[in-house]
Image: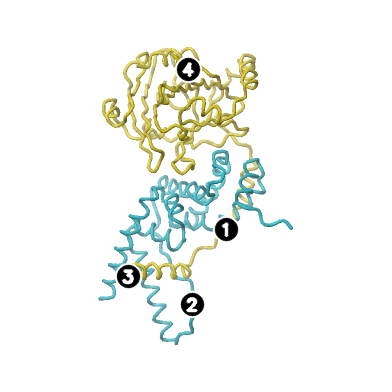
Chain colours: A cyan, B yellow
Amino acid sequence: MEGRPTDGDLFERAQRGDVAAYEEVVRRYQEVAFRTAYVITGSGADAEDAVQEGFVKAYRALATFRPGAEPRPWLLRIVANEARNRIRSAGRRQRLELRLAEGYRPGDAAPSPEAAAVAAEERRRLLQLVNGLSEEDRLVITSRYFLELSGEETAASLGIPEGTVKSRLSRALTRLRNRVEEAARG
Amino acid sequence: MAEETVLERQLLELARQVSWPATPDFSAKVASRLAAPVRVERPWFQQRWALAAAAVLAVVAALLAYNPTREAIADWINVHVLIQRVTTLPSPSPRASGAVGDRLALGRLTTLEEAQRSVKWKITAPSALGTPDLVYILEPPGGPPGTEVTLVYLSVPGVKTAGETGVAVLVTEARGQVDTQFFGKLIGAGTNIEPVTVDGHQGYWISGQPHIVYYRGSDGTLQQETLRLATNTLLLDVDGTLVRIEGNLTKDQALQIAGSLA
């Protein structure tokens, strides 16, 4: 029985001009690409344009993809570049306001209605604090924790060296922790 | 337990509750875009290359007989350059407007003296072109070890301004570790590569249809901003420094400029 083709197989086929293989690559990575572009642009419409253009450019640059390299950071770098170009050319960035999904229920506990309400309020407040961070802090925290990108992928999507991701993340977490503590003190 | 770890755990927990806009399916849209033919910018002057096709064919035939692999080319030139022959060229980034350095992603404007202080190798300026009009230094963030210095000659008597760069001649120099793939060049079917030697330095004369220049970061990925079209180019290994002379030049003009490197 033939298994699911690996990313490497798909890239190799796409490099030989197999558009169907590339379509599968797009399907595999479109969600993380779209959310990454959304975080950067703050707009669903801009993110959509950036992802489409990014995937087209990536296909045309496939000859330059190093065999054996990780495709995710490579693709995210191209899509994120497109997203940043869009902000630059439009001269504006919409302020991203992440929200909690409605009706979320943590699966591992059956708390009392009161405890559930308190936990939900805490989560809402933490997300509000993240939304209120500076652009730089918010981008690195959102990329690393909400998009769950690796250090290499975060570096690719933010267009910074991987070493900078660590220091930037550490500073952003410190500032967020300070705000959490301030908020707790009321 | 460190408080930061608790905060990190809370953030990861929060990640599962963040509401994201629904992801559209891009696969069909991307596939239909890819079905359209790739268009590479073709300045008017390229047409004269069609007239020269017979002469070009002789060179191509000789090259095909030689048929070096791209690795062989990179080894032979012994510096960080990778040449790839492809059947379809990727679309270059659109040429931005603004200053030369921004348009061609050459880095920061500097002076020849300051650039010389910033790099360990001796920058060799071609005396045939006189003093460069502009000097740029590119220190790529997270890029390979090494820096790129570009001398810009806005106008040179007897050399037409190149459509691809908007200037007469660009001389770019870089030095780095052997085997580091520093520059890449994508060569399409209409571009010719011919080995040359100048004052004992080995190199290549790349001519014909404009080719693609790109730049790789240290992680091997393409730096999209610098994917651009280049016109005729002489690549030369000058004692471990890659010198790239680019312009709307004849081979003789390029060799003459290279011969005046000092």
Q: Nearer the viewer, mark 3 or mark 2?
A: 3
| Residue identifier under label 3 | B3
Task: Reply above or below: B1 against B139.
Answer: below
- Amino acid carrying label 2: it is Pro
Q: Are marks 3 and 2 on the same chain?
A: no
Q: Nearer the viewer, mark 3 or mark 4?
A: 3
Q: Specify which label sits upstream in the sequence, 3 or 4.
A: 3
Looking at the figure, which quarter contains the N terminus of chain B?
bottom left
Q: Earlier in the sequence, mark 4 or mark 1?
A: 1
Camera-nearest label, 4 or 1: 4
Question: Which residue is under mark 2?
Answer: A106
The residues tagged by marks 1 and 3 sit, at their Cα atoms, a distance apart of 38 Å
Residue A147 placement (x, y as % from top left) = 47, 61
Horizontal side, residue B142 vs residue B63: left or right: left
Secondary structure beneath label 2: loop
What's the chain of the residue with tag 4?
B
Q: Secondary structure at mark 3?
A: helix
Which residue position holds label 4? B249
Vertical position of residue A146 compared to residue B210: above or below: below
How far, Cα to Cα, is label 3 from label 4? 64 Å
Mark 2 in CB contact with mark 4 (< 8 angstroms): no
Spatial CA span between label 1 and label 2: 27 Å
In this view, the mark in front (1 or 3): 3
